[in-house]
Amino acid sequence: MIYDPLDIALMLAKIALVFFVILTLAAYLVFAERKVLAWIQDRKGPNRVGPFGLLQPLADLIKLLTKEDFRPIGADKWLFYLAPAMAAIPAIMIFAVIPFGAPLRLFGHTVQLQVADLHVGLLLFVALSSLAVYGVALGGWASNSKYALLGSIRGLAQLLSYELSMGLSLVPVVMLARSFRLSDIVAAQAGCWFIVYQPLAFMIFLISIAAECKRIPFDLPEAEGELVAGFHTEYSGMRFGLFFVGEYLNIIALGGLAATFFLGGWHGPLLPPVVCFSVKVLAFAFLFIWIRGTLPRLRYDQLMHFGWKILTPLALLNILVTAWWLVLRG
Amino acid sequence: MKIVSDMTALLTGMWITWQHIFRRPVTIQYPEEKRTPYPRYRARIVLTRDPDGGERCVACQLCSAACPVDCISMQSAEAADGRRYAAWFRINFSRCIFCGLCAEACPTLAIQMTPDFEICKRDIMELLYEKEDLLIDGCGKSHDYNFYRHAGIGVTQPRGAGPKEKPPVDVRGLLP
Amino acid sequence: MPKLIIDSISVEVADGTTVLEAAQSVDIPIPHFCWHPALGKAGACRVCAVKLVDGPVKGIQMSCMLPAQDGMVVSTTDPEAVAMRRHVIEWLMINHPHDCPVCDAGGECQLQEFTIAGGHGIRRYTGSKRTHVNQDLGPFIAHEMNRCIQCYRCVRFYQEYAGGTDFGVMGSAGKVYFGRFQDGQLESPFSGNLVDLCPTGVFTDKTARFRARYWDYEMAPSVCQGCSLGCNTTPVARYRELLKTTARQNKAVNGWFICDRGRFANNEVNDPQRPRTPLVDNRESSRDEALDALLLRIAQIEEQYGTGSIAIVGSPRLALEGALLLPLLAQCCSAGALCYFTSQEESDTTLFLTGLLSAERSASQQDVRKSDCIVICGCDPLQEAPMLALAVRQAWRNGGVVYVIGDGIDLPCTFTTVASLDAVPLADAKQPVLICSAANRPDLLAATLKQQTHLKLAVLFPEANSFGAAQLAMAQGAISLERAVASGTIKGIISVEADIPPQLLAGIPFVAALDWRLTEAVRTAQVFLPTTAWVEMDGTAINHEGRAQRFKKVMHPGLPLRGLGPAVHPPHIHRSTPPGGDPQPAWQIVALIIAGLSGERIAEPFSERWKRLRELEAESEGVMTHDL
Ligand code: SF4
Ligand code: SF4
Ligand code: SF4
Ligand code: SF4
Ligand code: FES
């Protein structure tokens, strides 16, 4: 294969852009979460740093960077140091396959607004989200602390269980689009979004990604009331920051994927495609925050029960029905 | 249908939180905005004086016994007129949790809580209040109580001259 | 052996036991003011009311006055009894001045306890209170008559138990007054017990006046060091100051009380002049510096004058732990002499008398109290060991006869003066006790003792651990310092809490002292290391009978807070030792010297025959050491 230097330059530019945008977005998502939660609770939220508190993420960053980097006695040094990265990096890598806008025509090239348009993009996403489990599992295990260990065991079980239903809920999407390629899936929704055909799969996917992000009501791995801070109890400073940012990157990535799989990706009325896509991603992010402001945490047995006895069978059933319907339609 | 009622419950919750997003926040922006604490607010502790101007505290150590964080210490002593008083009296405000148990325990109404809650200091040692810092020139919340007028051991008045007291018994008298 | 049921628990008690004691024996508390285990009953306070629901007696009764009888069914919780007690408390409080906040008994007051237990909280009586004028009872005891509840404990103790004559009860009806005929110091050497006995705050310890509250006290079971009787005490400390000493019960030894000499002994411990800092050539130094200097000087002396030129001097007031390590120390610095006594005479008599005392021979205070014939032979118990005089009085109160040999002796009971031991009908007595002291030379006793095998012997030694020192001196073949110095070879003295007269120190080039008192040896010492007083350490003393008793650490050594300037208190820096907190128990310093000389570390002073004392409990009756 011969690469055009321009292609490579464009690729690098896309990577830089995606990096910049999602990291900023993640930082501001933290801010937005604090603000929205505050509003829900009739408070004002952070409003001291900069106008309307807008510089708060910067202040948080400085604080995290200047905090003591602490490692408990008996912790497994390398795993302890690596785990936060293992949690954050897969989340960032997922963005490689998300198409965030309609193809552009630039300098006579057609530029896909997607870092890498793999033909197995969907599978890559499933694989990466499985990898993210390692950050949680190893971080908790390496800390040599009971709270952290309990948190990571919970996290492990929860992520594995809900990955299953998440994966299964995506099968009908692939069946409809007849491709694993994300750009194909988006293209297939040019006329009608898959949410219309697959409302059940969408619901299952939504619930599963909430569990995948370890968000309330599925935040058992870090349940403050029970486990101090769960798997990242022993982390401080920027390593804690990585776990934290990883979580918000995950929200954005999974929101983007949900938009891609069910809400027509960058397709949308009136607005330019990139904006359409961003609006959908942010809407998901807001939904998650809103849910956090509303729902209480599940019990662990309820969580497992729901995952294995309801979501997974439902997803399987959905596949069968979809297949049957597709066969009937020919 | 359980699922319907469950969904309604979830959505009701979401609706309520949604409404709250648009409510006016109740936050008070301290220190720009301040609210006036109520007179019985429990903050900085003072030692008061009785209506006659004497120190009320008799260094009975009940407040220090009641204090759950052990932040009061004192040494009692005897004055020339037999009055028991605190030679030194110290409250460590860096430890005090303003629970008010000391004020409740005090039998002489000496130790009282005031609404002044702004007592932060840069140097923690400055939160060590000695008797001189605690003692005020007034009666605080009760204007007429003087312990020694009621305790029948004759400090502010001769023995047997207090309210509801008979004059001292003449032990050599033979009358019953 | 009557058998009765109290609150549905059945108890069997000895004849003559009161219902109150029977209840106490099964841990049912009944409030009581006038009843006291040592003073017995008076039936004055009426607060011990119980209801007898069945049996030979019925209805509300005073449990302290009522001997237990077969078939009694007693209820302490019957509503009628409870109401009775509540009303009694209420009228006992009618004249109370309501001044607990300024009363030193507050927090350790039986009246407070039983008022709360009785459920009386709010004053209903609207009449006026009777008042009294207080008396000045001297420097030790404060008087506040308005708090009296007329339980008569004080006067029963003072006059009946202790034989005092200058204190009593006056007046009648609601006006009874407990005091002296006029102001003045209480004469009885046991007057301090009024403080412990009075169930309210009429008598309080003036030396500890307005110093602290019960809940702030640092307390531990201890043993009096005032004389060789080893009465059990509970010293009380606060803010690094020994505030007061209270009596602790030990049935075999002091019973319930202690004498004033033992009680009012705070000053020495609290003395601001007490040497508390290590000194090298009168220059203040650290513990380690002083220790190094001491090791160096020992080596120098040996080099200069040859081995055997150092004397290790212990003393009969040194706790057993320290005394036990001295032989080892003597070995380590190849000392020429190991001494436990300074004067030859004291050494001779103490060793001789200790030799006479066996486990069966030696009389405890309890033996004295139980004796029917007591001979006091050339000693003055009231001066030398006051509590023994009190024990003699109890024997006399129980019908015992007291004989005294010698004159100028006073006792709180009547006695017959006889010329010699032969005039005493010892053979007829069931449990005779002979009391003598180390101050006079009672060689002639030996013969009598041989004849009268049932005769017990109580010897009054001058110091708290005289017996222990004598035992060790005998076992180690120690000589007196007087003799050692007379030999002329001694060029260095290491004095461990020893009281050495100046003439013995005069010609000695090197003196080192370990002590907590400012003795002559401390004044002349080139190297001084401060030790802890008995209340500042765990230790053991062997009393006059040979009973080893453990005393526990009451307080941490250090300059009392009282009198410290604002520069030192409140402390604005964190430090692990308080000012003046350098003293260590003597045995630990001796162990450090031994470690410095020989490298051997000693963590446990009790070894070989003394091993049994390791587990000695302070709250026990003690262990007899004759046959260890
Ligand atoms: S309780 Fe009251 S009288 Fe007693 S020491 Fe405290 S402040 Fe003083
Ligand atoms: S307010 Fe509470 S914590 Fe503070 S001094 Fe009083 S009793 Fe202690
Ligand atoms: S002075 Fe004390 S001991 Fe004596 S009668 Fe009164 S209350 Fe009882
Ligand atoms: S008799 Fe001796 S040991 Fe007993 S209290 Fe008095 S001084 Fe102390
Ligand atoms: S204790 Fe029984 S009457 Fe006083």
Image (spheres, coloured by chain):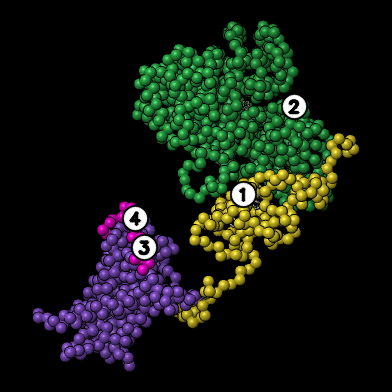
Chain colours: A purple, B yellow, C green
Amino acid type assigned to the residue bearing label 2 in the image? Gly
Residue at the extreme left of the image, as rendered: A1
Q: Are marks 2 and 3 in contact (CB under 8 Å)?
A: no
- Residue type (three-letter) at the residue carrying disc 1: Trp
Q: Which residue is mark 1?
A: B88
The residue located at (33%, 60%) in the rendering is A69
Q: Are marks 4 and 1 on the same chain?
A: no
- Which quadrant of the render holds ligand 2? bottom right
Among the 4 quarters of the image, the one containing residue C81: top right
Label 2 near label 4: C-beta < 8 Å? no
Q: CA distance from mark 2 to mark 3?
A: 75 Å
Residue under pointer 4: A72
The residue at which mark 3 appears reads as A67
Taking C333 as reference, is B139 above or below it?
A: below
Residue at position x 56%, y 48% in the image = C566
The picture places residue A90, in percent across and down from the top left corner, at 26, 70
- Side of C184 where C538 appears, left or right: left
**Chain for numbered disc 1:** B
Q: Are marks 4 and 1 in contact (CB under 8 Å)?
A: no
Q: Is residue A63 magenta?
A: yes
Horizontal placement of C205 versus C277: left or right?
right
